[in-house]
Amino acid sequence: MRLERRPTTSRTALVLAPLGAIAFTLAISALLVLWAGAPVGRTYALLLQGGFGSVFAWSETLTRATPLILTGLSAAIAFRARLFNIGAEGQLYAGALAAVAVGGMHGGGEGFALAPWLLLPLALAAAAVAGALLLLGPALLKRRLGVDEVVTTLLLNFIVLLGVSALLDGPMKDPSAMGWPQSVSLQGALELGKLIPQTRVHTGLLGAMALAVAAWVVMRHTVAGFDLRAVGANARAAEFAGVPVTRTVVAVALCSGALAGLAGAIEVAGRTGYVTLDMSPGYGYAGIVIAMLAGLHPLGVVAAAVFVAGVLVGADTMSRAVGVPTYIADVIVATSLIAVLVATLLTQFRIRAR
Amino acid sequence: MASLAMPSVPGTPPTMPAAEPPPVLRLEGITKRFGRLVANDAISLTLQAGEVLALLGENGAGKSTLMSILFGHYTADAGRIEVFGRRLPPGHPKAALAAGIGMVHQHFALADNLSVLDNVLMGTEPLWRPFSHRAQARERLREVSERFGLPVAPDARVGDLSVGERQRVEILKALYRGARILILDEPTAVLTPQQSEALFATLARMVAQGLSIIFISHKLPEVLRVSHRVAVLRGGRLVAQAYAADTTQAELARWMVGHAVATTARRRPAHGVGEAVCVLDRVDTEGGGDDRLEEVSLTLRAGEIVAIAGVSGNGQVALAELLCGLRRASGGTVRLLGRPLPPAPAEVVALGVARVPEDRHAVGVIGDLPVWENAVSEHLRGPVFSRPVLPGLRWVRRAAARAHARRIEAAYDVRGAGLDAPARSLSGGNMQKLILGRALTEPGPPVGAWNETPPRLIVAHQPTWGLDIGAVAYVHTQLIAARDAGAAVLVISDDLDEVLALGDRVAVMHGGELGMARAAEHWTRQEIGLAMAGA
């Protein structure tokens, strides 16, 4: 068996590819559902209903999607420039902690006495800077010394998480938290407004979507966007054409890290109110999956993040009703990623038996 | 002028004189399609014992596909192959090797860090045998190398050998494995004229001992020089076969291209050589391994083409990269119009240097990006194609950029699937036209004479490598036109014919050093060849 490049990619193939990927995913997951002894149709119906079946379901899905959009964007722009940032998880925590450091209620008091309209941007900026700085080192090491960024960013996650853990047990610890490793709370005035009353979905969603649109516009319509795509597609040719390759990689790293840092800050300001070590169930890593599902397209990231969030939220409801473990959600997301990647490949190549 | 046969009926072998012995190799009706492209269309060929068959054709004519099928890398859609009267199972490179077919690729498949003996032995011994029979192998290698007059030092590290010696190792590797049919893919592309002569002598000795050779080339003189018979491919079809003694270069060229071709235009001498545009004074470069400059001095003047000959890997890359802004001089000075040359591609372009890089696929274009973005990539940062919107962020003037790309497409006859198709989809010739058009077309106002300020210096590295005859003539014409318009032109090429066709002055590079640039009339081919070898 071998792959041969198709001379042209037909429109039909482009439409059929995602549909085929979805069908394949549902078929594979159905086997596991059957194995768990649950009725397939009802399980999927419950999953869909739990993720998208009501205003409440939508609100939960969109709440979950908010940090995923940001980490998805973080991965999408970095991967487009061939900077494989696996460190969004660490950058997210660094951002969350930086936001609390600026906007938290320190020393049992009220923290910095600044107007909320000034303090909130400062807290978000601190989060963005923290995330960005965390990726600056790996980006420079990659360009100057050829150190593989997959290794450095991945390993930095563990260092950051241990660092956060130390801070949560030390200087950042909330004295009123009954000994739990938990940071002081963000000032109440900095909490993000709710989009729908009585739900958790907050204005951070609008911010994340605005950033997705901005990322798309920059990528498509500016010289910086050309530089990013050129460096990702062929760094040697980009350098020949006059693209400042190192500057571009560093700029992409700063933006990617900043987006992941913002994901942490917005999660704190919109949902949790303080930092704990379990505030992110792997949003940083899920961002990579979402970026790949979206074909590294900034607007696609929004759709992919909502899909993944919906499956995760729906799986909770479904699990309670029919007793299939929630892990089925991870299987669906992972299988869909592989299926989409293979389907995309097959639009460009055909398999030939030799 | 005996074209032996035009195989119009698929599968019909060309008629040969009756007394021929059975062929050592017979290809019958080989057909291979890639999508809608028919790479090989019912090709039938035979090869006799002790014969050199030249396979002639332009890039994309189907030579490589045919040889890949013969060697088992591809499976033919139709047709059969017989070697020494026995059918060769399709799609098995090992079967081809076992049947006695050996191939010497243009890009050598040698491990630089191993000795000659190890390279020859590699893959010939089963992995599970605890000892390798090196003494025996060494004896056998000595025997083979003596028999065919290919002297090598078995213990030399391949990385230390010259290109000609490495090619010798490749040939020995095939002979050691008992090859009776040897396929040589563009074997002279990396050799000096003298080394080529030595290779031809080796080939003569091999066929005298009964070996058969398929010699792939697009250089007409050497094809006529070494082969007994010539088979010409065009567009996937075998269009003609002829005995070398019965044909001429003009006839072969016509078969190759499909219509009569004007042989490369006679070089018109430069008129009005002007001021010095670029002056290199005792320039050294560091890094890049063997490819570096040592005390190179050169003056490039307006209205003149300087052509640099040399076997590749002798500093040409360093020289080209230096002038393209990709590499820094570690010693000496480079001045462009009296000012130091900045080591940054964007600034070099802004100063009026037009650049045609050696590797058009890997460096010339960004294959995944569309044609129009590639057409403006060098000037995108300038005021014509973008305007500032925020600090550090420039908005692309898409309409202006696309209009410019369309102008290049029209003026340089770039044919492809349009402005939005990825540049990767262009053929080699069209890609080179796009690169040439981008380099030579100033981004100007969209109306009127948009090419008012021609480039001051043109650096063209291997500008016609791998192009078909038509595209070669086009590129040469454009370079000469740019010279006549007052540009200083530097052409760096391994192809001696190109150097002599273009250069008003010619200099030879060897081991990082550049000889004196002398008027082309003052060189003979022999002298250039000797200088290329470092004599």
Image: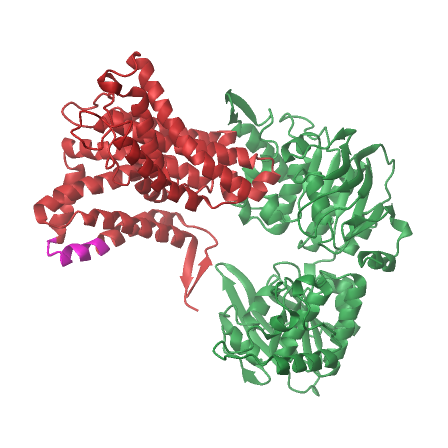
Q: Is A216 placed left or right of B202 in the picture?
A: left
- Residue most toward the right? B522
Residue at image coords 69%, 66%: B166
Q: Main secondary structure of the magenta part?
A: helix
Identify by letter the chain in red: A
- Residue A162 can be seen in this image: yes
Identify by letter the chain in green: B
> In the rendered view of the protein, which quadrant contains the C terminus of chain B?
bottom right
Give yes or no for residue A336 being in the magenta stretch. no
Look at the picture and state if A247 lies above or below A35.
Answer: above
The image position of residue A107, as x and y in percent, is 25, 19
Q: Toward the viewer: B439 or A15? A: B439
Q: Toward the viewer: B9 or B429? A: B429
Quadrant position of residue A55: top left
Colouring mode (rainbow / by chain / secondary structure / one colour): by chain
Q: Toward the viewer: B320 or A350? A: B320
Look at the picture and state if B432 lies above or below B354.
Answer: below
Look at the picture and state if B144 lies above or below A85.
Answer: below
Quadrant position of residue B81: bottom right
Q: Is B211 placed left or right of A199 in the picture?
A: right
> In the rendered view of the protein, which quadrant contains the N terminus of chain B?
bottom right
The image position of residue A272, as x and y in percent, is 22, 29
The image position of residue B219, as x and y in percent, is 74, 62
Which residue range is magenta in the image?
Answer: A28-39
Q: Is B534 placed left or right of A68 in the picture?
A: right
Give yes or no for residue A38 being in the magenta stretch. yes
Residue at image coords 14%, 32%: A56
